Image (cartoon, grey):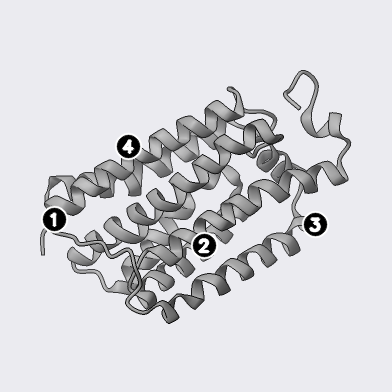
Amino acid sequence: MRIDGFGAGLLLIVGVAIPYLAWKTKQRFHGDELPLPRAQFFFQTAIFQLLIYGFALVAAWTNAIRLRLVPVEWRRAWPALALLVLALLVLKLRWPSRDDADKRRLYAILPHDRRELGPYLVLCVVAGIAEEVIYRGVSFRLLVRLGLTVWAAAAIMSVVFALAHSVQGWRSTIVIGVIAAGFHFIVIYSGGLLPAIVAHFAYDAVAGIVIPRWVRNVVPRDAAVGPGRDP
């Protein structure tokens, strides 16, 4: 079955353009500090995701893809809670083994105080909705339309999603790919996007709160922030 130009365009954006931009960003960003204020970075990232989200909705409409938000049965939503707990547990257990570069990189792109937490949580809401619709919803269904099996499409989109987050470091990219595969399973098993959206938001929100605290607990505040940087 064919897809139209909007569908092909979305797959190119998601599968090629975004991973490329993430790779270029990783090349320029060495984990010291963002080139712009974090709050501005959060808002700009949210706007970018909303633009792709809008394009994905257009692609869904022109390709007659119906997105289901609510699960077929709510009892099928339990894997979302299980994945959230497991992902947060892995985050905690992996933290001591992360190298300093990874920790600095994550610290630089996460909120440092309450002023930055609000914009960050806005980004978490946008990312939870937009990324699930874009990756687990429309793009995934477009690949199935092209003749791929459900599981092959899920595997490809999991890799693509991980590459889109490569700025966090390659070890984190691999973990993100595994989590993305879990989100695909949740959507396929439950029949709806909402459980994955909620779990996605909760993971990002919790990570954004606890990781900066972990960094400051083991690194002196001035060393974690660096000279001339925002507290």
Q: Do the residues labelled 1 and 3 touch (CB within 8 Å)?
A: no
Q: Do the residues labelled 1 and 4 touch (CB within 8 Å)?
A: no
Q: Do the residues labelled 3 and 2 touch (CB within 8 Å)?
A: no
Quadrant position of residue 212: top right
**Residue 193 spot, x, y in % from top left:** 37, 64
Seen at 37% across and 62% down, the residue is 156
Residue pointed to by mark 3? 96
Seen at 13% across and 58% down, the residue is 64
Labels 2 and 4: the sequence-earlier one: 4
**Measured Cα–Cα span from mark 2 to mark 4:** 22 Å
Labels 1 and 4: the sequence-earlier one: 4
Residue pointed to by mark 4? 51
Discs 1/3, front: 1
> Is residue 177 in sight in this rendering?
no
Dot 4, crowdedness within 10 Å: few (<14), some or many (≥20)? few
Residue pointed to by mark 1? 63
> Is residue 116 in sight in this rendering?
yes
Q: Which mark is residue 199?
A: 2
Dot 2, crowdedness within 10 Å: few (<14), some or many (≥20)? many
**Measured Cα–Cα span from mark 1 to mark 3:** 46 Å
Q: Do the residues labelled 4 and 3 touch (CB within 8 Å)?
A: no
Discs 3/2, front: 2
Check disc 1 and report its element: helix, strand or loop.
Answer: loop
